[in-house]
Image (tube, rainbow, N blue to C red):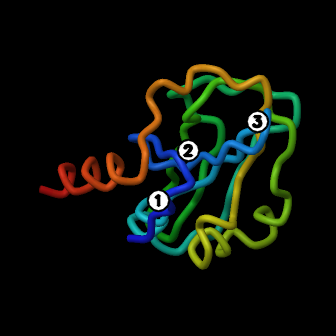
Amino acid sequence: MELRAELKYSKSHEWIKEDGDVSVIGLTDYAQSELGDLVFINLPEVGDEVTVGEAFADVESVKAVSDVFSPVSGVVTEINEELLDAPESINETPYDAWFVKVGEVKETEELLDADAYKAFVESEEA
């Protein structure tokens, strides 16, 4: 399981990178490996509001359809349209295959650093 120290993580297995006043959100390496090969993704629209803990997208793998939950609240400022044609890039490079960029970010209290996220994943697997 790859983790990056510069990112924050949620207990629902999304990563978030703060980039100025915008936050970039994607699925963790752990999440994509648990889901298996991704074949479809459904993203929100620019301007949609996202709420911490609520689904903002879904991914379809060869196993099932799974919701993707927002680790923060805010407004979608950009979507990664490349994922619509190449959802498998989430499996190949999960930390480069971002889903959305969110502005007006709030409610970041529940985010974990890499060490805390690793400990959380290990406790779930125990």
Q: Which residue is mark 2?
A: 68
Residue 41 image offset from top left, x and y in percent: 68, 57
Tell me if residue 76 comes above or below residue 9 in the rendering. Answer: above
**Quarter of the rendering occupied by the N terminus:** bottom left
Disc 1 marks a residue whose amino acid type is Ala
| 99 with respect to 7 (left or right) | right
Disc 3 marks a residue whose amino acid type is Val
Mark 3, secondary structure of its residue: strand
Identify the mark nearer the N-term, 1 or 3: 1
Q: Residues within 10 Å of mark 1 (few under 14, many from 20)?
A: few
Rounded to the nearest angstrom, the CA distance separating label 1 from label 2 is 13 Å
Q: Residues within 10 Å of mark 2 (few under 14, many from 20)?
A: many
Residue 52 image offset from top left, x and y in percent: 56, 25
| 115 with respect to 87 (left or right) | left
Q: Which residue is mark 1?
A: 64
Q: Which residue is mark 3?
A: 102
Quarter residue 73 falls in: top right
Q: Nearer the viewer, residue 73 or 44?
A: 73
For marks 1 and 3, give the one nearer the viewer: 3
| 44 with respect to 93 (left or right) | right
Quarter residue 19 falls in: top right
